[in-house]
Amino acid sequence: MSKSRSALRLPDPSATPRPKSGALRSAVITGLGTLTVLALAACGGNSGAATGTTGSSGDAAPVSNGAAQVKVTIQNVDGKAVCVLDHSSAPAGPVSFEVSNKDASGVSEVELLSDKRILGERENVIPGLKPSSFTVTLGGGSYQLYCPGSEPENTAFTVTGSAASAGNSVAEQLKAGTDGYAKYVDGQVDSLVGAVDELKAAIDSGDVNAAQLAYAKARPFYERIEPVAESFPDLDPALDLRIADVQPGTKWTGFHPIEKDIFEAKTITANTKALAAGLVGNIAKLKSLTAGLKYKAEELANGASGLLEEVQSSKITGEEEAYSHIDLVDFVANIEGSQQSFEYLKPALSKIDADLTNTISAKFDEVTKALDGYKDASAIGGYKIYDAALKASDAKKLTQLIQSLQAPLSKIAEKVATA
């Protein structure tokens, strides 16, 4: 966590906020639990249009209990992992996707995308587990089902009809964008709850290797929505404070003392278990605080830019993950979170300033492609360990890459605020 904070600033509904530097404080809470939870457990952006279907029926999905029902089966076919839809289209309205994994261990995640916006997702779908599902309300149009690691990764999905229109005015589209982003945050927090539960279970079992893997798995969910989490000044320090930022007399809690135990000392103590239990409790509190939040368009814009500042202030320097050195995992998650903020604004922003929107889209593609070069399937978290040698050779290049994106991205807050 960086000391310098920007991006989304939201009030704590349970206490009077203590503003931080440059904070925005104008988010409106309209009542907890008012959002429809769509289980948007998002996990990472992607790029690329749909490239085809995989064994799906052209018939529209049947409607049951008010929602179209689509089954997605991840399976191994002739040695290749594929995602098979039983129906490739549905009528406009609520659509439920039931996801199961028959026997393909290389694919464990399914996302439904509109352009590059993550509308719904289910992850940790591994062979042997019961099917899980998510439901989204869709208007007519073209969508993509994204299964990272399958062949092909993208499958087209069509919705017919005109329900759930977001409206045509800029104001209506900005409203739809912020509503969608709120659901995205809900999904990230839901996934974070499950991920820290898994981390606690690994720590309680005394398995250091499993705890390391669980730690790396949990971090991206937090990093994608870090501006939102940071908006709760009484909670964020308990979750993500680095040792250098701990005030005298304050107990160090959250992710990073756990990181130190399991990556540097490689030992699980009674204190490590207590820290894990505390982390689970504080993430549950984060979930209660973020449920029902509403956002303004400029808050999404500031958050998108703020996440890039986080990359430059603590990820590129290697300060964030000082013991695990999985800074690139956080780095990528910050970029993904930033892009989702942008994508939810994009329909309106395209009307406000089409050239700027196209420039930012192209820059996100450029950054994503560059980061793909750092993937390492053998490393914890799936990206190269950000050690001293990599930092020395690549930090400047990464900084320039992020700055080239942040420059145009920093312009959108004023654009949407004055639209």
Image (spheres, rainbow, N blue to C red):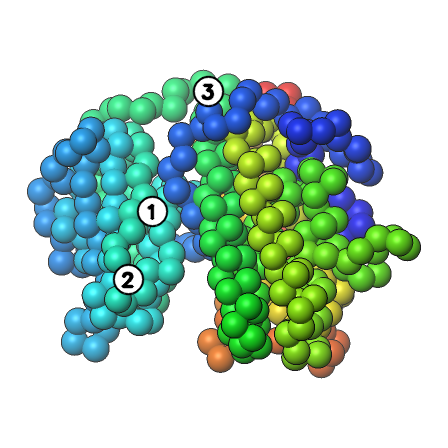
Is 6 displayed left or right of 408 in the figure?
right
State which tag comes first along the sequence, 2 or 3: 2
Say which of 150 and 414 sits in front: 150
Q: Which residue is mark 2?
A: 129
| The C terminus: image quadrant | top right
**Kind of residue sitting beneath label 3:** Glu
Q: Is residue 140 above or below residue 42?
A: above
Visible residue check, residue 1: no
- Which residue is pictured at 79% across the width and 33% down the height? 19
Is 353 displayed left or right of 248 in the figure?
left
Q: Is residue 314 above or below residue 17?
A: below
- Which residue is pictured at 63% across the width and 32% down the height? 299
**Kind of residue sitting beneath label 2:** Leu
> Which is more foreground, mark 1 or mark 2?
2
Q: Which residue is mark 1?
A: 112
Residue 22 in picture, x, y percent from top left: 80, 35
Residue 99 in picture, x, y percent from top left: 26, 53
Q: Quadrant of residue 114?
A: top left
Marking on residue 172 = 3
- Which residue is pictured at 62% across the width and 69% down the height? 326
Say which of 352 and 126 sits in front: 126
